[in-house]
Image: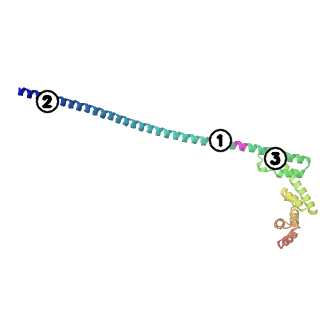
Amino acid sequence: MYKNKNSKTLWVYAVVLFACAAIVLLWTGYSQIKINNYLQEYEDKLHDKENESSMFQYNLSSALAENEKLKKQINELKEKLEAVEKENELLKKEISDSENKKEKEKNLYENIMEAYIEYAKGNIKECALKLLEIDSKSITDNNLLEKYNDLVEKTYKKASELFYFEGYENYKNKKYSEAVKSLNLSLKLYDEDYYADDCYYFIAYSEYNIGNYDKAKEALNTIINNYPDSSYYKDAKDLLRIIENK
């Protein structure tokens, strides 16, 4: 009886022990599965992160490459734009130069025609004065240049003589400023005639009487240096000495 009881007790202990062992094994297995699942999930997440990182790097490289491409295209467009702007400026300048040239040619034509009208009226001095205002080097039309030269030949020498007599009359009437103006115009139009030294002489005395001693000296030195045979040579030196002693 006692023996049976002990056997029974051992059997209960064995069953309990076995049950506990089974429970431990089950719990251990479950824990291992759970840990494995956690590890797998972590590995999956890590793999996803690696994929995301790789994708990000790929996208970043693509974006950088695209950015460089866009920069290159922008620089090329800027260069083209600058070239177009330069070309546009050149075209504007050409148009402006062409318009200015046409305007100058128009003004030249009108000025020469005005001078011709004065000549046709018999106003030699007025014609010559208008011609003096024209820059002959800017005349590109041969017919217009021929007309200009013809008028110059017909009027300059005659007008120079008329201005000389006008200046001399003003000098005699003590209108010294008017005399200087007319005599200078005479020389400007034609300074190779017989009265050229007369002009300088009357200019010198007119300037002297006005009080413009430097201009008087300039006219006197012209007589002394360029007209040594002039009848005014001695008077010019005498007046120059008087001015220098002032």
Q: Which mark is residue 147?
A: none
Quadrant assignment for the C terminus: bottom right
Q: Is residue 226 magenta?
A: no
Of 207 and 158, which appears nearest the observer? 207
> Is residue 154 something one can see in this rendering?
no
Question: Pointer 1: what residue?
Answer: 88
Of 110 and 41, which appears nearest the observer? 41
Q: Residue at 74% x, 44% y: name it.
A: 100
Give the left or right position of residue 29, taking residue 179 as reference. left
Magenta stretch bounds: 94-98
Question: Pointer 2: what residue?
Answer: 13
Q: Residue at 39% x, 36% y: name it.
A: 52
x, y percent for residue 137: 77, 50
Give the residue type that dot 1 points to.
Answer: Asn
Give the residue type that dot 2 points to.
Answer: Tyr
x, y percent for residue 120: 90, 46
How far apart are the two marked residues, 2 and 3, measured between alpha carbons?
A: 146 Å
x, y percent for residue 190: 85, 57
Q: Residue at 57% x, 41% y: name it.
A: 78
Give the residue type that dot 3 points to.
Answer: Glu
> Is residue 155 something one can see in this rendering?
yes
